[in-house]
Image: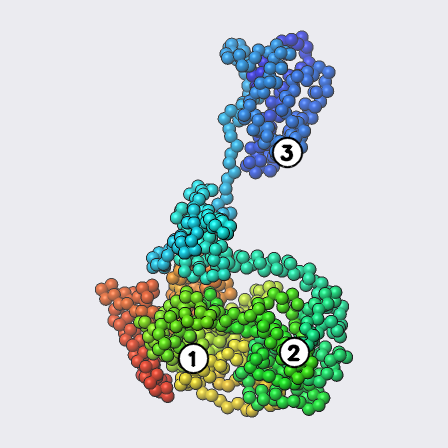
Amino acid sequence: MKDWILQYTENSSDESQSDEECDPNEKYLELTAKLLEAREEAVQAKLEGAKSRQKEISNNIRKLVQEMNAIEEDSRFNPAVKIKDLDKEKVNESSDQGLAASLSQSHDTPCDQGLAASLNQSHNIPSLACQQDESPGEQEESEDFGDAFTMFENQAAEEKPKEPKIDLSQLDIRQFEYTRQQWTGKSPKQFLIDWCRKHKVDSPKYHKMNPVRNLWKCRVTIGRKKEETIEACPEILCENVKEAEHLGCTLALYQLCKGQAIHQLLPPPYRDVWLEWQDSEKAKAKEAQTTENKPRDQLITKLMKKLQLGSKNSENKTTEGTKDDDDTVESWENLDEEETLLYISNSEEFSTVDGAVLIFLPGLADIQEVYELLQSDRKFSDTKRYQILALHSVLSSSDQSSAFKVPPPGVRKIVIATNIAETGITIPDVVFVIDTGKVKETRYIESSQMSSLKEVFISKANGKQRQGRAGRVREGFCFRLYTHQKYKDLADYTVPEIQRVPLEELCLHIMKCQLGEPDNFLAECLDPPRPQVIARAMSLLYEIGACKGVASLTPLGHHLAALPVHVRIGKMLLFGAIFGYVEPVAVIAAAMTTKSPFVAPLDKLDLANLAKNSMATSCSDHLTLYRAYTGWKQAQKIGYQSEQQYCQKNFLKRHTLLEIENVKNDLVKLVRSIGFSDTIQTIQQPKPKYGEVLDISKAAVAMETDLTKPMIAMVKAVITAGLYPSVAKVTYDAPVDAAANPRKVPCLGETAQGPAHVHPSSVNRHLAATGWIAYQEKVTTSKVYLRETTLVSPFSLLLFGGDIHVQHTAQLVTVDDRIKFRTYAKTGVIFRELRKLLDELLDKKLENPTLNLLGDRVIKLICRLIDCEK
């Protein structure tokens, strides 16, 4: 293109040498060359992301276009000089697409041959196609404009658009390596092949992709005849093809086996990413549900503010079914139990109806809270008009018998109960039922591998059963404190307990009764549990030392079978009683079955963390919790106001502390019922006054509130016994400038499955020590975190850990081949013999339940050994 432009300007200059003024056609061609060059620079600046340079070039292009437009209006201007493909309007608008198109055209066709031909004919310029050589004179003349076109020519002939740089930090790149020590089972690829073979579908096909150099991902396709084809292609990139195939197979299994715990049979790295997908899917579903319900909830809230409690559209009559008025109110979910009682008492329709009120609540702590709320109310505390009673399996029998008696005329009886009042008992004079729609069920927690009481919604069958409690003798009324839509969404029936709880306790009882192997026995149940759940339960029993061989119990296993609690908690309680510290251990064990009493409001997060850290002690979340609990008990003795101030100051939830106390008292009673006791003696409590129905919350045992050095050491050892093998190694390397520039470094632990961070809520978040920590649960969010940790000693691991192996020549003692101590061989032998002596003591206790172990010399020796460790 440059050649024919130069030739044209040369001819034009020859024809008008006498004209001293600048030729507009020549000027127009110079501006055209500059415009094309500016286009090239604009595209390059766009690719490089140089915004300031883009702005400068854009202004330059605008000026060039204005000058060219001015020349076109000159009478001497020849329109044949214009380049047809030069879209000045797009250039003037600084359109990126126009620039990119022009760039591609200039690269592909440096000279528009059609346009050149037309110019040749009109101005007698030789054809570019025929012009092979130039004379030296012509070359010298063309050099006058050569410099102006150098950059344009180089770019048009040589340069290509640079590919945009990929920011690797924005990609999800992971490693999925694992050793044979961490996992000896099948790989995800083998699992998928077996699944396809079992379900008689086509074998999976793998399409490997390499989107970035040295990074891979794989699309796995599974064709199914009767159903749609499954395609799984994770967004995570791997460093080799093998890991990419395994990851693709993991995603395919996730899509094929939703709702099944297949991930428990996969290697640890792929198990973790499965749980990530699961959590992400739940979060998206929750967000979608929230978005869907938002307009409805806003409408309900608005209507509830306008409606009076006397509205007649809110009751559900058991004899006529459920009444709903979509134009007025569909929900009682914004009301609480006290407001509903006020409605019954004040409304014209129900105030004249005699009969008792039955309130269904989830648990004992909720019963206690509502009971105290009603007792503190001026209206409901009037014993001449109301009689408030509570029903629970742990409450005093005298108060429970009062629930079945008909009160005097003019007195309304209010009974607060859990689901025990659904089918277990019948109160004949109940006319009103208030159903909160909640119940506490035992559920298995994957992260901690323990059971826990979780508050969940009831099933439709439970709701109908509760409704049926009203009006056993005459017409009754049921008030449901949840929406009609929520009732429709409830499950038809409750999942059988054998399919939703851990099976360790059940397996212990089967082996204790000598009924054969647990998996064979449970396979004959009406609702048999999944085989992998049974295998997981047996694996845990072997790990904690409760069984050996084939369906054979150890002495510890026989004692654990007598306790109706999770085996980990049972082991902690037994050793706590043996070594004389059942009270603090019971508090810690009770907290493991509930949620943490520490709360952290978003607007006061720093203050909450500061309050918890001020209570931190002994590098242990468990002992910190016990310290908070004992402080609460001391404040409770002073009075209710002092108790409230203590909870507010230290960001503690009173409801959770009450629940921990109730569970703790139950655990202590269970341990003592099988013949184990400690040095803490039971003290006599005065008979509760009228109204103190929840006497279980009054301390039944004396509290040892001082955390002494022997107590801390022994309780940590017992925690190790209960939580093992959930231990992680921590290493602290002090920075070189630690003294001059002190800073807190997050603590990182090495578990059997890989590295994990101590959770930010833990008091050991910035632990500056080298050793071992026992953790309660491992969760995966943005990272893998360890929650509720305690720094434990080597002696505790040697006494209550796994199998001890002694390497005499190497002077090495190992626990389960993972925990290694460099020491004399005789040290390992001594601890191994101490374990045998402890097992013999448990055997003796099994034969003679009244045997007192506290005075035994072996127990005293172990206590001294733990206490004297530095």
Quadrant holding the C terminus: bottom left
Measured as percent of width and height from the top left, residue 191 is found at 40, 55
Q: Amino acid at mark 1?
A: Leu
The numbered mark, 1 or 2, whose residue comes first in the sequence reads: 2
Q: Is residue 302 left or right of residue 752?
A: right
Distance of label 1 from label 2 (alpha carbons)? 36 Å
Q: In this figure, which residue is indicated by the disc labeled 2? A: 433
Measured as percent of width and height from the top left, residue 847 is found at 33, 85
Q: Which labelled disc corresponds to residue 563? A: 1
Q: In this figure, which residue is indicated by the disc labeled 3? A: 95
Q: Amino acid at mark 2?
A: Val
Q: Is residue 448 left or right of residue 138?
A: left
Distance of label 3 from label 1 (alpha carbons)? 77 Å
Q: Amino acid at mark 3?
A: Ser
The numbered mark, 3 or 2, whose residue comes first in the sequence reads: 3
Of badges 3 and 2, nearer the viewer stands: 2
